[in-house]
Amino acid sequence: MGLKSKDVISAADLTKAEVEGILKEADVMLGYLRKKKAPDLLKGKILATLFFEPSTRTMLSFQSAMQRLGGSVIGFSGTESTSVKKGETLQDTVRNIENYADCIAMRNSVEGSARLVAETVKIPVINGGDGANQHPSQALLDLFTIKQERGLKKLKVALCGDLKYGRTVHSLMYLMPMFGMDISLVSPKPLRMQEYIVGDVGKRFGIRPKTYKSLEDVISWADVLYVTRIQRERFPDPNEYEKVAGSYFIDKKMLEKAKDDMIILHPLPRVDEIRPEVDDTPHAKYFEQSFYGISVRMALLNMLMGGK
Amino acid sequence: MKGELKVTIIENGTVIDHLPAGSALRVVNLLDLSTKLPVIIAMNVDSPRHRKKDMVKIEDKFLSKQETDKLSLIAPNATINIIKKKKVSDKRKVTPPDEVKGLLDCPNKRCITNFEDCGTRFLKNGSNYKCYFCESQFTIDDFNLY
């Protein structure tokens, strides 16, 4: 199965049928991964991973996914060794790269950069994060993790932390309500989600997520706790950051109030919002996320390049 | 005389009517009319439909599609009258476009359109305008129009 769109730029572009198709394909890929044997579906194809902004998990996950399917990878992480450093425009850079590869997976700190690249080149483009805007492949793998761990049903989900600049939560907002999930938003006031996203999602799915200031308010309610890092660099006053950051952490004591089967997800990296003591509880699923992520990215690459 | 506007008639050009009261000077600035052509402005005149309205008459000027789109952003109920030989030869209402291309700068400083020469695009979404690239949404007051 292919995708209707040539590219994967924003979760807001995806239909429920497309998301279901991606998750179904990811199931197949997960089977290959578990057997440690995947067919060479993308043999002879080249993926360019253009990470203008450094990345650990997302870039390696795309590279691993491509190689698992028999394809090969070119690319860079950071712009030090590229012509961007010499002042080349993004459009010129990718016009050249489309001659070398069959697909681009990219990250750039500038919002809208992935959309511009998709408009510029003829080959498929996957957005691996554009500033604070979107990170659709992460949101798809989050959804896939929920599907594997809890099933896609009317779950109660609390999105916590930096909801203003967190790109994964922006993407999740457009995917979770497709499956009837009830969303609560938990963040300090300066990091609340943009009203236009809440309004947009509300109009699209007929929902109105509730807003809370404290994790305590949702800990016993949630089936899924999706935690994001509160980014120090976003606060003009470091004292304000300290006040807020200290109030957003999960430890074993807090989990005493949680449902037994509640799961905790995090796009990682974390700083101190999830204490290490939580890692060995049955709630912690954030390391499984990166495993599931490979199958979702294998699915995306195969759907965009293989056309199976 | 009641119901009659004492505003000079133009020979050829455009009359922009049914502007919100108090908006005429903004329209003049928006369309960059202040230094080039004879412009007649009427403000806070009686209007049966709007109680009070403004009006701008421009001699020897016919608005382009881009100018009409721009005007519609701040005066969505305006009417454009094309005047030829002192008579109204065409009359139409402005329509806010579903997509605004190349007219507005994205107020999001982290948007790619503020870094690369790629033009801007905004899609109308209710009363908001959504940047096609960075997906941020804005009300018309967020844009630097003048």
Image: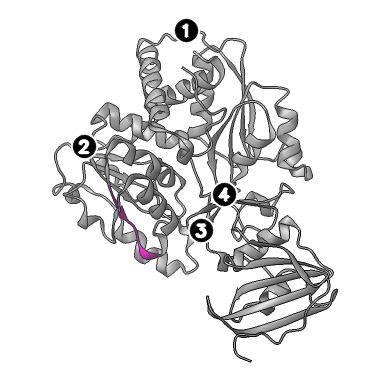
Q: Nearer the viewer, mark 4 or mark 2?
A: 4
Rate crowding at label 1 as few (under 14), some (14 to 19) or many (20 or more) other CA atoms within 10 Å.
Answer: few
User: Where residue A52 sits in the image (x, y, percent)?
Assistant: 63, 40
Q: How many discs appear?
A: 4
What is the spatial separation of the Cα atoms under label 1 and label 4, in whole angstroms? 37 Å
Above/below status of A270 relative to B66: above
Please name the amino acid that badge 1 sits on: Pro
Task: Determine whether, in the image, residue B12 is placed left or right of residue A78.
Answer: right
What is the spatial separation of the Cα atoms under label 3 and label 1, in whole angstroms? 47 Å
Q: Tell me where the magenta segment starts and ends, as one range.
A: A183-189
Task: Determine whether, in the image, residue B31 is placed left or right of residue B92.
Answer: right
Determine the secondary structure under disc 4. loop
Q: Nearer the viewer, mark 1 or mark 2?
A: 1
What is the spatial separation of the Cα atoms under label 4 and label 2, in whole angstroms? 38 Å
Circle 4 chain: B
Residue tagged by mark 1?
A: A39
Let me know if residue B134 is in the magenta part: no
Which is nearer the N-term, disc 4 or disc 3? 3
Determine the secondary structure under disc 3. strand
User: Where residue A292 sits in the image (x, y, percent)?
Assistant: 37, 26
Q: Name the residue rendered at 57%, 49% in the picture.
A: B134
Task: Determine whether, in the image, residue B67 is placed left or right of residue A158.
Answer: right
Residue tagged by mark 4?
A: B134
Please name the amino acid that badge 4 sits on: Cys
Find residue A196 and report its image quarter: bottom left
Q: Name the residue rendered at 34%, 45% in the picture.
A: A205
User: Which label sits on residue B10?
Assistant: none
